């Protein structure tokens, strides 16, 4: 089973100068399909598209739904597979050891050229995954198989938090439309949903929003609340907390410093004053997030009622507007207290 079989299909997405799919590429294609692509499609939809692709009547230039989906799959599949395929293809292994190709007319590319190619393919591949998920979302009602995907684990995996895609996050914080960055920020976003949004919204109302996002039943009023207050607050707070976290990465050998300059000629060396720039970014993001949270609380307290934002209205988090506040200090207080 394979969702890409011919060199002509591969050439639609990656420029290669061969007449067949190299063995090392085939291995990477199979591995990427069984891990990354299978996770997005889920087993049922994967079987459906595979059956359509294997059918004798399949037309690669067709416009039917299965063919459109196959092309949406092949774009990220090919580019992500070739990211690692570049490395595997540069060397050959035989009984005498590991070898590279080097003749009077052909020589192995410089390391920086291979690295640049891999980075470009990696970014395009992940952007293709975003496009694939969006295609599935846009065509949910076009086939029973896609409707089944929507309610499956695979169809709801990207909807387990309030932000569902890179494009939504990009509206509030610039991450260069990078799915890679969006995915890296996921653990921080999920923590902040509980620790920052939970106390403001009330955990029952937060869960209501999560459930509506997951099941694609978001009301217009709740969607407006998300886009006006919740998303901006969560995005800013995520950046504020993630900047110091993503500056370090954990790997099998320990902890690595991952801060680098755009100019990668000396990417391991931090520029003078970089720590201050990062701290300024953190402070600005955290202050912006805190302001949005205050606006969110004020808006909900002013508008919530028995018929609007009912879950919030009935929670202990709700505070009635213009409620008289009992002063904690008076002229006769023997001890002065601070809130």
Image (tube, rainbow, N blue to C red):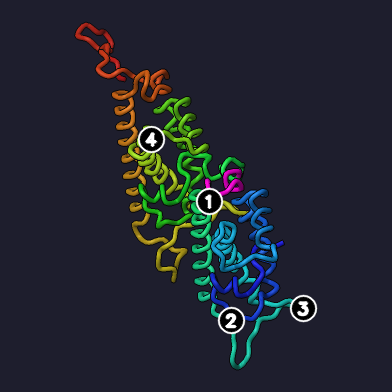
- Which secondary structure is most common in the magenta stretch? helix
Farthest right residue? Answer: 95
Q: Which residues are magenta?
A: 141-148
Examine the image and state in which quarter residue 66 appears.
bottom right
Front position in the image: 149 or 189: 149
Left or right, residue 284 beside residue 134: left
Cα distance between the residues tagged 2 and 1: 32 Å
Farthest bottom residue? Answer: 104
Quadrant in which the N terminus is drawn:
bottom right
Give the class, few, some or many, for how many residues have Cα within 10 Å of label 1's Cα (few <14, many ≥20): many
The residue under label 4 is 220
Numbered label attached to residue 136: 1
Which circle, 4 or 3, is nearer the viewer?
4
Of mark 4 and mark 2, the one earlier in the sequence is 2
Give the class, few, some or many, for how many residues have Cα within 10 Å of label 4's Cα (few <14, many ≥20): few
Residue 48 position within the rendered picture, expressed as x and y whole percent measured from the top left: 66, 53
């Amino acid at each position: 089973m394979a969702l890409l079989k011919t060199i002509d299909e591969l050439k639609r997405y990656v420029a290669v100068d061969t007449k067949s799919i190299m063995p090392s590429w085939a291995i990477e294609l199979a591995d990427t399909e069984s891990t990354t692509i299978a996770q997005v499609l889920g087993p049922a939809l994967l079987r459906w598209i595979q059956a359509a692709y294997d059918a004798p009547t399949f037309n690669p230039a067709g416009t039917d739904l299965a063919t459109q989906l196959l092309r949406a799959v092949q774009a990220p599949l090919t580019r992500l597979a070739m990211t690692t395929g570049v490395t595997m293809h540069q060397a050959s292994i035989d009984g005498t050891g590991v070898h590279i190709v080097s003749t009077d007319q052909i020589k192995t590319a410089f390391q920086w050229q291979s690295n640049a190619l891999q980075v470009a393919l990696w970014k395009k591949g992940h952007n293709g995954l975003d496009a694939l998920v969006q295609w599935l979302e846009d065509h949910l009602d076009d086939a029973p198989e896609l409707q089944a995907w929507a309610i499956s684990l695979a169809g709801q995996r990207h909807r387990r938090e309030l932000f569902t895609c890179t494009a939504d996050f990009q509206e509030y914080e610039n991450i260069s439309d990078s799915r890679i960055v969006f995915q890296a920020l996921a653990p921080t976003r999920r923590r902040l949903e509980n620790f920052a949004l939970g106390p403001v919204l009330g955990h029952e109302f937060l869960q209501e929003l999560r459930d509506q996002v997951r099941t694609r039943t978001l009301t217009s009023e709740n969607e407006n609340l998300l886009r006006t207050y919740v998303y901006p607050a969560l995005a800013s707070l995520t950046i504020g907390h993630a900047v110091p976290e993503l500056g370090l990465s954990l790997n099998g050998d320990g902890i690595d410093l991952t801060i680098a300059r755009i100019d990668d000629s000396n990417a391991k060396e931090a520029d003078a004053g970089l720590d201050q720039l990062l701290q300024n970014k953190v402070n600005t993001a955290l202050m912006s997030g805190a302001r949005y949270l205050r606006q969110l609380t004020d808006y909900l307290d002013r508008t919530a009622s028995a018929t609007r934002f009912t879950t919030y209205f009935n929670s202990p988090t709700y505070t009635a507007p213009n409620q008289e506040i009992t002063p904690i200090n008076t002229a006769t207080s023997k001890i002065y207290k601070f809130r």
